[in-house]
Amino acid sequence: MANITVTVPDEFKQEMNEHPEINWSQVAREAFEERLSKLKTVEELDEITSKSELTEEDVDEISEKIKRSLAEEYLGEEA
């Protein structure tokens, strides 16, 4: 496993020191993992949408239809 160094403000470090029961390295690993997962998802979506022939107007129209449908389903009202 590789090591990295993270710099935080002194005040932040003081607060972290008040909680020695927390494994801050694990917290950082989980945060890095979550961010990388989100980044991968965005990159995958970008790849999928780059092949789309839909216009911005098409996307807006579909989005509005979805919102109306969800409102009707969950709020029981016609939007």
Image: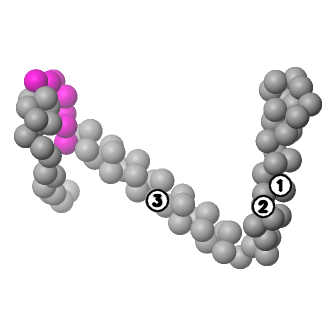
> Is there CB contact under 8 Å for labels 3 and 1?
no
- The residue tagged with tag 1: helix, strand or loop? helix
Question: Residue 74, relative to residue 53: is it above or below?
Answer: above
Which residue is identified by label 2? 59
- Which quadrant of the structure image shows residue 54? bottom right
Q: Is residue 77 visible?
A: yes
Which residue is identified by label 3? 39
Give 45 or 77, whichever is nearer the viewer.
77
Crowd rating for badge 3 (residues with CA inside 10 Å; few <14, some 14–19, many 20+):
few
Question: Residue 36, relative to residue 10: is it above or below?
Answer: below
Crowd rating for badge 1 (residues with CA inside 10 Å; few <14, some 14–19, many 20+):
few
CA distance for labels 3 and 1? 25 Å
Q: Earlier in the sequence, mark 2 or mark 3?
A: 3
Question: Colour mode?
Answer: one colour
Q: Amino acid at mark 2?
A: Val
What residue is rendered at 19% in x and 28% in y? 22
What residue is rendered at 48% in x and 53% in y? 38
Q: Which residues are magenta?
A: 18-25
Q: Amino acid at mark 3?
A: Leu
- The residue tagged with tag 2: helix, strand or loop? helix
Residue 19, how many percent across, how many down?
Answer: 14, 24
Which residue is identified by label 1? 62
Residue 3, how many percent across, how many down?
Answer: 15, 57
Q: Quadrant of the C terminus?
A: top right
Residue 63, how many percent across, how many down?
Answer: 78, 51
What residue is rendered at 71% in x and 76% in y? 51
CA distance for labels 2 and 1? 5 Å
CA distance for labels 2 and 3? 22 Å
